[in-house]
Amino acid sequence: MIKAKGHLILAVYPTTLEKDPTISTDTFFAALSRFRDRLLPAPAQAWLKSPPGLWSVFGAVHLFFLVFAAVLSLRGEAFSDTFIYRVWADTGFDETRITGPSPWVYPILALLPMAAAHLFGNAPFLFLWVLMITALNFLAVAKLTGWGRRRAAIPAALWWLGFTALLGWLGFARVDGFTAPVVLIALSLGVARPFLASFILSAATWMKVWPAAVVLALFTVVKHRVRVVLAGVLATALVVVLALSMGSLPKLLNFLLQQGDRGMQLEATFTTPWLWMSVLGLGGARMYMNQDINSMQVDGPGTEVMSVLMQPLLIAAALLVAGLIFWALHTGKRNGGADRTELLLLGALALVTAFVVFNKVGSPQFMVWLAPAVAVGLAHNWRAWRVPATLLIAIGALTFVVYPLFYDALSHNNPVMAAVLTLRNMMLVVLFVWSVRELFLMGRRRSAVPSLHDAGTPAGAKES
């Protein structure tokens, strides 16, 4: 109840915590909570949710990867894609001296951490690479939890650390491991600081393209969209200056031009029908290694056409989701207000998931992209975000089974691994549908924020 200008006004505040009349997961999560309580006594749970518990878990997870990287580095070795990155850095990113994928399949800022990890030569490359990702993860957890002072956000940070540990080297031996914590920091800044958030996201986009999805979500929900655009222009201008200083301006957009010839990658969601055709020996479908880009692909009837269609399909899906975010924002206003932070997080998850589901490339490290929006969402409203958080843990576990555990079996038409990958891809589609549905519901439900008119705010007063 609100008192405004001598009148009492009854304000009804339904929120995202309301039980969905169509789908209720209360029973499932109650059972999950009971299982957790049997597994961990109350004192252990309380300690984990404290700052010492949080930083202990952070230290344990990252110490494991740092020690592993140190052991390999002492033997002069790298791991996974860092072998390729090290070769690129060792040749000064000169593609004429490289056999295999060109370093310019990545945007130019992705080359900076490679060069930094190579400052002392080949031997310590992997250790320095993992150390830099550890530092970024530390900043992300610190920002998410207010350096551990926001106790309500600590469970979200623990979820982030758990997901990081689950995916393992997919987050520590790929460029994606640099972009994920950067995006998490930007989302934590959110609508309150759109210029800085946009600048960070734009810089991350020049390292790996996927943060552009989060930039689009930010542009759609904030009031001062010009700030988002100006920050993007500034970041791009600085990148152009860097390219000029490196004498690499003609190669600046190679990362876009070199994707067009890609076929349907084995793990991509839309490749699933041809995956099963290959497994069952139908239609001449087959798996093969594209040596030019070090990627396992599937060829079969219609794959060439589908490969061409995927890019416009991805663009159409992104634009449709952006339109839904815009609709939810303005319809929400008419219903009494709009939670721009919730819209940003849901929009970011929907757009990034679209980038994964409607992509002809389906690399396992793409699952890293999905975690930042969910982690910040859990810190914002744990109950509302527990469904995607649980889905993403299952997606991460299935991805780990596919790669690195049994990828060789998958690439040799193993039906069990094909079934595991199919289940993972179905879960990605479910995650996308969930995020789109929540955006639609946000536009329809009355907001928890009372409208300014109902609260008696004078006309022309600045919105908070």
Image: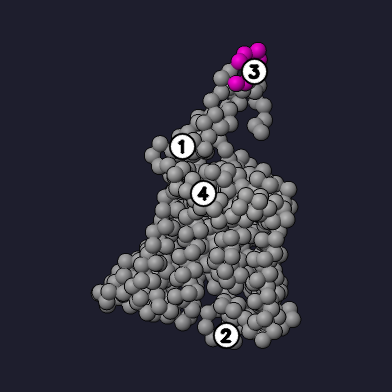
Vertical order, 82 against 75 (above or below)? above
Residue 360: x %, y % from top left: 42, 66
Vertical order, 122 against 146 (above or below)? below
Q: Are marks 1 and 3 in contact (CB under 8 Å)?
A: no
The prevailing secondary structure element of the residues shown in magenta is strand
- Please name the amino acid that badge 2 sits on: Ile
Secondary structure beneath dot 3 equals strand
Instruction: State the mark number for residue 19.
Output: 1
Q: Nearer the viewer, mark 4 or mark 1?
A: 4
Magenta span of residues: 1-8
- Label 4 crowd (10 A; few <14 / some 14-19 / many >=20): few
Q: Nearer the viewer, mark 1 or mark 3?
A: 1
Front residue of 302 and 275: 275
Distance Cα–Cα, label 2 vs label 3: 71 Å
- Please name the amino acid that badge 4 sits on: Arg
Who comes first in sequence, dot 1 or dot 3? 3
**Residue position for label 4:** 34
- Regarding residue 161, the answer to whether it shows in the image is yes
**Residue position for label 3:** 4
Q: Residue at x 49, y 45 (%)?
A: 30
Residue 195: x %, y % from top left: 67, 49
Q: Residue at x 65, y 54 (%)?
A: 44
Distance Cα–Cα, label 3 vs label 4: 45 Å
Who comes first in sequence, dot 1 or dot 2? 1
Q: Residue at x 42, y 62 (%)?
A: 424
Q: In the rendered image, which quarter is residue 336 located in?
A: top right
